[in-house]
Image (cartoon, rainbow, N blue to C red):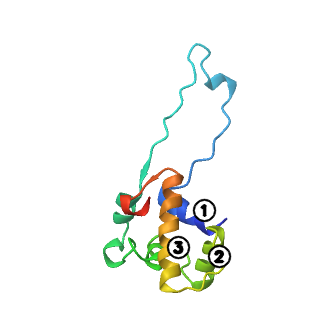
């Protein structure tokens, strides 16, 4: 699984595997009901996690990854940067700010509600 996939799953939760229904379980006179897609409030979800009050996840990619228990090593962040489209990641402050912002933007693109300052 990709690093971003791990981040997304840690925040959004794992989707339940769809189990095939038997024909006897489907009533013939009722149409199938679709569940509406709900937006995940990323800020609320992260704030509710144990340790959120001790980590600066709002601005630090390292703290964000630590909070959701994803490897925050340089190698992992470099791999994440490549996934996000940056092949020259050096681990500098500027790179980490870019990476954090990009992760937040991609969470928003995938159904997350993130603070407005991350999406422009």
Residue at 52 percent across and 66 percent down: it is 102
Q: Which residue is mark 3?
A: 99
| Residue designated by label 1 | 5
- The mark nearer the N terminus, 2 or 1, is 1
Residue 69 in view, yes or no: no
Extreme residue in the front direction: 120
Tell me the element at label 3: helix
In three-dimensional space, the C-alpha distance between marks 2 and 1, rounded to whole angstroms, equals 12 Å
Provide residue 82's location: percent of width, then percent of height.
Answer: 66, 73
Q: Residue furthest top?
A: 29
Mark 1 and mark 2 in contact (Cβ < 8 Å)? no
What is the crowding at mark 1: few (fewer than 14 residues within 10 Å), some, or many (at least 20)? few
Q: Say the numbered circle drawn on residue 79.
A: 2
- In the image, residue 107 sits, relative to residue 85, either above or below, namely above
* Residue visible at 65% across and 66% down in the picture: 2
Residue 91 in picture, x, y percent from top left: 55, 85
> Which label lies toward us, 3 or 2?
3
């Amino acid at each position: 699984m990709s690093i971003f996939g791990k981040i997304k799953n840690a925040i959004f939760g794992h989707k339940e595997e769809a189990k095939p229904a038997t024909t006897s379980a489907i009533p013939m006179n009722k149409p199938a009901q679709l569940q509406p897609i709900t937006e995940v409030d990323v800020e609320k979800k992260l704030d509710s996690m144990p340790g959120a009050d001790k980590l600066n996840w709002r601005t630090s990619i390292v703290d964000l990854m630590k909070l959701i228990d994803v490897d925050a090593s340089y190698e992992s962040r470099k791999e994440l940067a490549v996934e996000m489209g940056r092949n020259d990641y050096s681990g500098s402050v500027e790179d980490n700010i870019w990476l954090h912002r990009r992760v937040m933007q991609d969470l928003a693109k995938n159904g997350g509600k993130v603070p407005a300052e991350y999406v422009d």
